[in-house]
Image (spheres, rainbow, N blue to C red):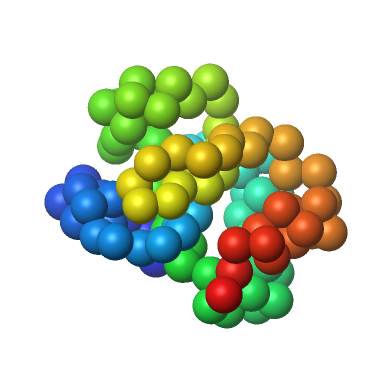
Amino acid sequence: MQELRNSELEYITNNNYDYFILYLYTPLCGTCQVASKILGVIEELLPALQMFKADLNYFPKLAEEFQIESVPCLLLLQNGRLKEKIYAFQSVPYIYEKLKKIAK
C-alpha cells in the first residue's frame, strides 16, 4: 500500500480512479496497527484494488473535509467522492466482503 504525502493526495483524488481506498491512521494508535495487518491481507487477496494510506497527523484538512471522527478509518472513494467510511475493522472476512465488490 502506497503511503501518500500532501502533494500526492491532491493528484490521487483528482485522478479518475473509478474506485480507490484511502486508509487513514496515526503511528501511535494500537488499533491502527491491527487494521494495517488486516489491510495487508486484503491487499494480497485483492491485488487489483487501488489502496493508499496516509498518516492523519499530516492531513488536518482531509480530516475536516471528510469529518473523520477517529482512526483507523477506511475511506471508499469513487471519482474522488466519498462513498463510505469504515471505522470498525471487525475482521479480515468483514473488510474483504466490503471491498471485493469494488475490486476489479
Work out whether residue 17 or residue 43 is closer to the camera in this orientation and state it.
17
- Against 73, residue 102 (above or below) is below
> Is residue 68 found left or right of 65 in the rendered image?
right
Q: Residue at x 46, y 67 (%)?
A: 50
Q: Residue at x 32, y 32 (%)?
A: 62
Is residue 79 at least partly visible in the picture? yes
Left/right placement of residue 5 relative to residue 90 reads left
Q: Is residue 5 visible?
A: no
State the image quarter where residue 85 is shown: top right
Residue 56 lies, in percent from the top left, at: 39, 36
Residue at coordinates 61% horizontally, 55% vertically from top-left? 36
- What is the count of numbered marks? 0
* Residue 6 screen position, x and y as percent: 21, 46
Q: Position of residue 22 (x, y in %)?
A: 46, 50
Which residue occupies the foreground of this view, 64 or 83?
Answer: 83
Residue at image location 41% in from the left, 28% down from the top:
66
Residue situated furthest left in the rendering? 7
Q: Is residue 72 above or below residue 76?
A: above
Quadrant containing the C terminus is bottom right
Depicted 44 relative to depicted 23: above or below: below
The vertical placement of 26 against 69, above or below, is below
Relative placement, left or right, of 53 versus 42 is left
Seen from the viewer's position, the closer of residues 71 and 87 is 87
Between residue 18 and residue 4, name the one nearer to us: 18
